[in-house]
Image (cartoon, coloured by chain):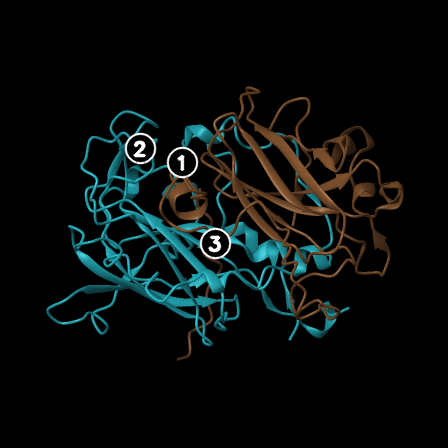
Chain colours: A cyan, B brown
Amino acid sequence: MTLVYPLQSLAAHPARLSPAYRSTVKRSPTKPLIPMRHTLSELTGPVYGHETVREHDHDLTIQGKGEPIGERIIVHGHVLDEDGRGVPNVLVELWQANACGRYVHVVDQHPAPLDPNFTGAGRAQSDAGGYYKFITIKPGAYPWGNHHNAWRPAHIHFSVFGHSFVSRLVTQMYFPGDPLFPFDPIFNSVTDEKARARMISSFDLDNTKPDWALCYRFNIVLRGRNATPMEIK
Amino acid sequence: MSNPRPDGVTPSQTVGPYFAYGLTPNGKYEWNDAFTGNLVTPDTSGDRIRVAGVVYDGDGAPIVDCMLEIWQADAQGRFSDPQDKRAQPNNSFKGFGRVGTDGRGCFAFDTIKPGVVADPDGKPQAPHIVLAVFARGMLLHLYTRIYFEDETANAADPVLALVPADRRATLIAKRTGNGVYTFDVHLQGDKETVFFDV
């Protein structure tokens, strides 16, 4: 199977210059990007890193001496290519704020408590069918300095590797029905409503564990689709 | 389990300012590193090199919360990926590295000089490293390439040939010491780095 990575798939992504998100103004290129054909350098990618995934790295609720504070949740789904095929054995990394909306990072000065039992970092490997699963705490919303009374909707950061270096994706998973959606310039930097919807997890009652944890499903769709015979050189 | 055909890719979002404890802990946070800036193991063959630089924003200020990832071939021009049919399963060189910039916007990778990789027509490309740049304020990472100033093959490289001559220098790492190359990244300005639409 030969995968291709047409540039059209990139249309779902935000414009790099999205002035409502102020930091983009000085951090987006002003000159046009140069198109080029994909060579082996772009069409291959790291297929390792999984040796660093330890048995319990997908469970952020058991990394501390005690249980973290907050609402325990299951976040699971499939890493898929554009044809809907599971992408097997890929590294999925996650990081997030705690239930109070505070990150462990030294730069985060939001006056909300840190949780000694929650770091907010996790790692998993998709299985042969592309399936991954994390157990974590629902992150809180938090304020940021972009504009007056700016708050980020609750989100979990994801970093995913696919079949090639050009299928690399860093994104954020949101929760359904968040009242902050209309006001968040990062979420709304994705201008297509259907594309924005792909960043929102869905509540998954079928996999919610009775008396234990709500479940959210988040499928991650990476670039890459089957080549038509015309496209195979 | 089968999934319906998706209606598009998952959109990219910024890595944000707080990724370090999850993606580049590097001894500053208790989480272990999946990747570092050192790609070399004792049994790696090839010329050891260090590629170091600073990432600058549109004001010329160093970016202290930037993440850089590199991907490259080994000294024989082979990628550690079975999709490269010439890949050697036991090759200890994995070809991928990741670092965060420090408080002065600096980064460094310790690696080997990559070999020659052919383009889709079989034409040789000059030795190069693919670089992806992520940061707060970047909603979608940027791709560029690191070439080396002491490679005569640069003159015939098919990708460099796509770049206007007056901007090519932004893609070429300067040799600043024995095995040491300097490659700064400028997101904007007169020296704006060439980024590729891939």
Q: Is residue B186 visible?
A: no
The residue lying at 78 percent from left, 39 percent from top is B148
Label 3: which residue?
B34
The residue lying at 31 percent from left, 33 percent from top is A108
Which is more N-terminal, label 1 or label 3? 1
Label 1: which residue?
B17
Asked if residue A128 lies left or right of residue B165, the reply is left
- Report the front residue among B25 and A44: B25
Locate residue B62, reporting x and y percent: 54, 24
> Which quarter of the figure is the N terminus of chain B placed in?
bottom left
> Which SS class for mark 2?
loop
Q: Is residue B85 above or below residue A186?
A: below
Asked if residue B198 lies left or right of residue B155, the reply is left
Locate residue A12, reporting x and y percent: 50, 51
Q: Residues within 10 Å of mark 3 (few under 14, many from 20)?
A: many
Q: Amino acid at mark 1?
A: Pro
The residue lying at 48 percent from left, 60 percent from top is B8
Does the residue at mark 1 contact the one at mark 2 (Cβ under 8 Å)?
yes
Q: Amino acid at mark 2?
A: Asp
* Mark number displayed over residue A108: 2
Q: State whether discs 3 and 1 lie on one chain.
A: yes
Frontmost of labels 3 and 1 is 3
- Report the front residue among A217 and A20: A217
